[in-house]
Image: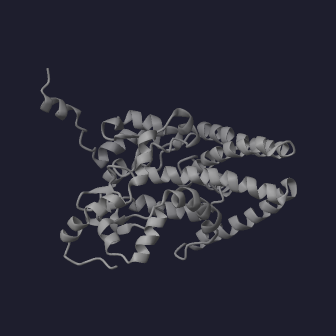
Amino acid sequence: MLSAASREKSSAPRPLPSVAEWKRAIAGFQSPSIRRAVWQIANTLIPYAGLWVAMYFTLAVSWWLTLPLAVLAGAFLVRVFIISHDCGHDSFLPSRRANATVGSITGFLALTPYYHWRWQHAVHHATTGDLDRRGSGDVWTMTVQEYLESSRWKRFAYRLARNPLVLFLIAPLLVFVIWQRFPDPKAGRRERRSVGWTNVALLATAVAMSAIYGVVPYLVLQFLVMGIAGVCGVWLFYVQHQFEGAYWERKENWDYTSAALLGSSYYKLPAVLRWFSGNIGFHHVHHLNPRIPNYYLVRCHEAAKLDEHVKPLTTWKSLGTMSLHLWDEKLRQLVSFRDIRRNRHRVLTSDSGESPNG
């Protein structure tokens, strides 16, 4: 019989694979499949369009029939966005032009300018988990020391931004409906143009759909569908990088493989939610190699035996991530506002001795 020490040693996670090792393990999953991609387009866009048709006919009967259809359409819109997301990585279809075409259409359905979002998302992949390169395509995250040294106004703004009501209900609509209507000043010409053309297409669509559904019914349905999809999308993005045991390092110590396997969660969802979210819960695999299409993420995870390196985040346990607010560089973990109130003296005395403002 194994001793306690032996059992602990045997159950300990294996060391992370080297870059060469994980590249070999997942190399066979980088080639997109036209058959799988076309089938995913069909089983996503056709039902999504069908739900909008069904909502039109049920409006004449009762809103109580229409609203559940809108909620289901919102769930399908998450899957629509995942297709655009994969196209942005040139992983969905073999052809770069086909990816751009499909990505632009599916991005438009999610109110997202394809080229502009693709550029921002590439920055996210290059900087996730890097404390010195925060602020682009990520959830606003401060360190404990930064928070304590901030003004009262900035601390208030940060606490407001991390409030679940704001972060998961208000922010999604602000991001998809308003914020994405304006290009980033740092964006290139093609990225800025994609914002403009997307806005024109959305305006034309809104006019046409309002003529069919009526202005108020269309706007209510569009906001509801987008709201459901936005809430789900922001929640998924949040738990993919904000969880117990997450990885953050200063630039000089930042490592790509560690940031992928330790800084991107393995969100173990029920099968139906995994389908609607396009397997994006296997986010550690996606960050290891963004060229792997969503329809291969599960098989890649299993083939590379990543269960030996990555601890899954269950649906129930993911709810606890909402109480994680700040990165403690001394403890090397995410902590809550309550934690820093308890340990304020430790944080201040372990630093250079400077007192926080306010």
Q: Quadrant of the C terminus?
A: bottom left
Q: Is residue 9 above or below residue 195?
A: above
Residue drawn at x 46%, y 71% as measured from the top left: 157
Residue 128, horizontal then vertical, whole percent? 39, 59
Judge whether residue 260 can be spotted in this image. yes
Q: Residue furthest top?
A: 1
* Residue 340, x across and y down, in percent: 30, 62
Q: Using residue 222 as the reference point, say whether residue 56 is left or right of it.
A: right
Q: Is residue 36 left or right of residue 143?
A: right
Q: Position of residue 66 (x, y in %)?
A: 77, 44
Above or below residue 225? Residue 273 is above
Residue at x 42%, y 74% (from the top left corner): 154
Residue 284 or residue 3, whichever sits in front: 3
Q: Is residue 208 above or below residue 39?
A: below
Q: Quadrant of the N terminus?
A: top left
Q: In this view of the protein, which residue sits in the foreground, 348 or 315?
A: 348
Q: Is residue 115 visible?
A: no
Determine whether 32 is above or below 220 in the image.
Answer: above
Decide if residue 11 is on the left or right side of residue 240: left
Measured as percent of width and height from the top left, residue 23 is found at 36, 45
| Residue occupying the point 66% across, 59% down | 111
